[in-house]
Amino acid sequence: MACIVEETERADESNETQIALISGVPDDISKSCLARVPREYHMAMKCVSRRWRDFVCGDEFCDYRNKFNLAESWIYAFCRDISGEDHGKESMNIPMREGMGFAALGKRLFVLGGCGWLEDATDEVYCYDAAINTWFDVVPSLSTKRCYFACETLDGKIIAIGGLGLNPNAKRTWDIYDPLTRTCKSCSDVPEIEDSFVMDGRIYIRRGGGGSSSAVYSASSGIWEHMDDDMASGWRGPAVVVADELYVLDQTFGATLTMWCKETRMWIRIGKLSQLVMKQPCRLVSIGNSIFVIGKDCSTVVIDVENVRKTTMNGVMVCSSIPKTWDDDIDVISCKSVAI
């Protein structure tokens, strides 16, 4: 009886894959039309049929949206409340640890490594697919168990750099993780690292001392090189790249936004952020020409980099803000932008 049911289900699925997405319309045109539907309606689209569900949840749907510049950018924040519990932990269904690495590629978020007070560093990798709202394990794992490391994406690959681990040499190694081919390549001879960003196809890393402690990795040459001292000297906080320009939020005294000028090779002070609309420490995420400054409790300020210099009052930037929608006290661990 069970065999008959399974064969019937397979037959139904086979027949449904032969049915057009939209009756009387070629599939390529149907896919182009469906790709134009905003994300807020994607859940309803999944209920129409199996074919619609599989298409909306698949990579081809995102490829169509990217092809026609229809992809929507969404910011995902990994948060922890003051009691040490993680918001969304039940829905995430993955172990949350200290010192985890976070990365975003397309419609997917990746959580790597980490450790706990009573738990050694791990090499585990988890992936969240925003299109289907599901977490799953990723194989293979990192080649080195590590925590408190830098994590960046470059050329469709995830780069996990330095950090701490069971192996005392972990801080001098780095992994190149390719989700497409499901391979992880281990490399060595990397400087110790505190922070990082990607610009012009290169990964920039720094230690707390800055200057000669900073380095640059070029994917084309595969070599770590010394970073310009003038550039490193002004890198004093979280960094983000907008339209090939580097911006840094210096939180030493308040929160001051600065920009690195490639022509003059000097740091330019843009302005300060009002402490009335956001709380430190802050994380930075860029979408289009805007910088989203996400502070404690997810209080958020949006900076339009094209107009920010024209809208300063007494050195304080005039920006739009997004209020938080809950009363819990939470810290933002990391923020990433996902395109769907």
Image (cartoon, rainbow, N blue to C red):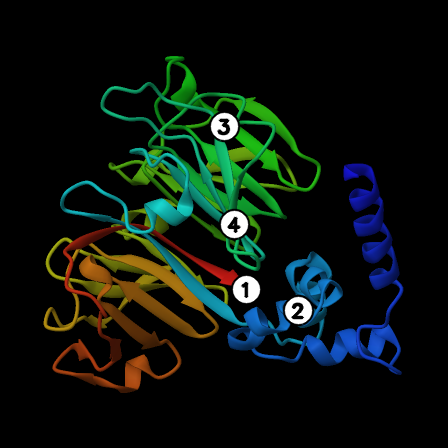
Seen from the viewer's position, the closer of residues 181 and 318 is 181
State left or right for residue 311 relative to residue 163: left
- The amino acid on which the numbered mark 3 sits, given as a three-letter code, is Trp
* Residue that protrudes farthest toward the front in the picture: 1
Residue receiving disc 2: 66
Q: Nearer the viewer, mark 4 or mark 3?
A: 4
Say which label, 4 or 2, has the lower sequence index. Answer: 2
Residue receiving disc 3: 174
Query: Residue at the spot x=52%, y=26% of the render?
Result: 142
CA gap, disc 2 and disc 1: 9 Å
CA gap, disc 2 and disc 3: 31 Å
Q: Residues within 10 Å of mark 1 (few under 14, many from 20)?
A: many
Residue receiving disc 1: 339
What x and y, as percent, mark residue 263?
Answer: 44, 65
Q: Nearer the viewer, mark 2 or mark 3?
A: 2
Judged from the image, the secondary structure of the residue bearing numbered disc 4 is: strand
Say which label, 2 or 1, has the lower sequence index. Answer: 2
Q: Are marks 4 and 3 in contact (CB under 8 Å)?
A: no
Q: Are marks 4 and 2 in contact (CB under 8 Å)?
A: no
Query: Residue at the spot x=48%, y=21% of the render?
Result: 144
- The amino acid on which the numbered mark 1 sits, given as a three-letter code, is Ala
24 lies above or below 121: below
Residue receiving disc 4: 134
What x and y, as percent, mark residue 73?
Answer: 50, 68
CA gap, disc 1 and disc 4: 16 Å
Q: Are marks 2 and 3 in contact (CB under 8 Å)?
A: no
Image quadrant in which you'd find residue 335: bottom left
Say which label, 4 or 3, has the lower sequence index. Answer: 4
